[in-house]
Image (cartoon, grey):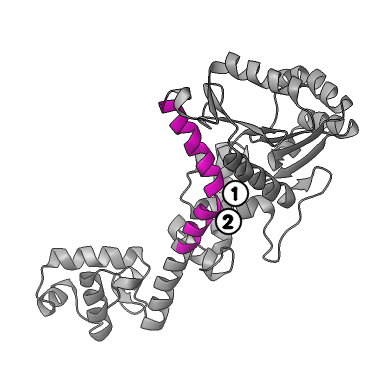
Amino acid sequence: MLSALGLDAMSEAVYRGMLAHPQEGVASLAERLATTETAVRQALDTLSELSLLRQSGEQEGRLRAVSPDIGMEILMARQQAELASQQMRIEASRAAAAQLIAEYADLRPASTNPGVEQLIGIDQIRDCLARLTREVQEEVMTFAPAGAQKLEHIEAAQPLDRDLLERGIRMRTVYLDSIRNSPHTVTYVNWLAELGGQVRTVPSLPTRMIVVDRTTAVIPVSSDDTAAAAVVLTGQGTLTALCALFEHIWDAARPLGNKAGTNDLGLSPQEQSVIDLLAKGCTDEAIANRLGVSPRTARRLASDLMERLGARSRFEAGVRSVQQGWLPAH
């Protein structure tokens, strides 16, 4: 009956048995349900994981079943959290599709993939970017998810940036919020703005990406090693999706001079991103990579948010996030 809420038949039977006969132990429940004590204990483990059991306030060491109204609310909130996570995965489908295109291109000869050119190694990638920079006529749109920029990379990029901006090329770049803690990166970004470049930041980005004149996009095959290989995408449908993704994130981003505020729930953009990534099941290392921060910072952010939620596990944090409106309920 409760299978629709994620509860298997044995766990439901044990839960009902504990509600009807709260004083019975494992042996009595096993006898009443005509099953083994092992099966009952496994069901108790499941019920504990779902927060449907609590320590008894009257008998130390004994578990009691939570009341049905609370129990059903917990199960429904759990499903809402799972649905919210699924919805966020759907919303990120454009970026995932682009990544899949890149990986697929890496497995097949370039001649069989119209609109897809493979680049192997950093030299080919740099040569391609140099060519595209020479040929650009109107606009360059960039996702830069690496966080703080290295000084040597900034020094190498500045002459090219100046040349593009002096030619009247529109340059829009989205960095991670974490660059705001890097003085030399902030100095570079302010220099770009003085020359006419437009820069905004967001808590996290789906992938590194450069789009030239809305006709050509360069993205890495692997986000973990962007120098190993990349693909050049020119298909109209793919570019339409990637440009829409850029505009969507650009509209939600904020200029570097704007301080981060909090939403109606008291969450900063970075904290909201951590909640979203936790709901997707991301590890501390994955969160750190997406936010451009250290794993230690990612762990601290996650721990602080779990403490604010009063959650003892990441699963419970997902449930409580939905209950408190930190994640959408679907």
Label ID, residue 301: 1
Q: At 55% across and 58% down in the image, what residue appears?
A: 307
Q: Residue furthest bottom?
A: 20
Residue 39, image quadrant:
bottom left
- How crowded is the residue under tag 2: few (<14 C-alpha within 10 Å), some, or many (20+)? some
Q: Which residues are magenta?
A: 83-108
Q: At 62% across and 39% down in the image, what residue appears?
A: 239
Do residues under tags 1 and 2 come within 8 Å of each other at their CB atoms? yes
x and y percent of residue 281 in the render?
A: 46, 50
Distance Cα–Cα, label 1 vs label 2: 6 Å
Establish if 208 lies above or below 303: above
Q: Relative to the observer, which residue lies in front, 112 or 68? A: 112
Instruction: Name the image quarter holding the N terminus.
Output: bottom left
Q: Amino acid at mark 2?
A: Leu
Q: Amino acid at mark 1?
A: Leu
Q: Relative to the observer, which residue lies in front, 39 or 141? A: 141
Task: Write down the residue under mark 2.
Answer: 305
Q: Is residue 225 visible to us here? A: yes
Secondary element under disc 2, as helix, strand or loop, is helix
x and y percent of residue 109 in the render?
A: 43, 23
Magenta segment main secondary structure: helix
Label ID, residue 133: none
x and y percent of residue 208 in the render?
A: 61, 34
Q: Relative to the observer, which residue lies in front, 11 or 81? A: 81
Secondary element under disc 1, as helix, strand or loop, is helix
Q: At 72% across and 17% down in the image, what residue appears?
A: 152
x and y percent of residue 241 in the render?
A: 60, 45
- Magenta stretch: residue 134 in it? no
Q: At 17% across and 72% down in the image, what residue appears?
A: 26
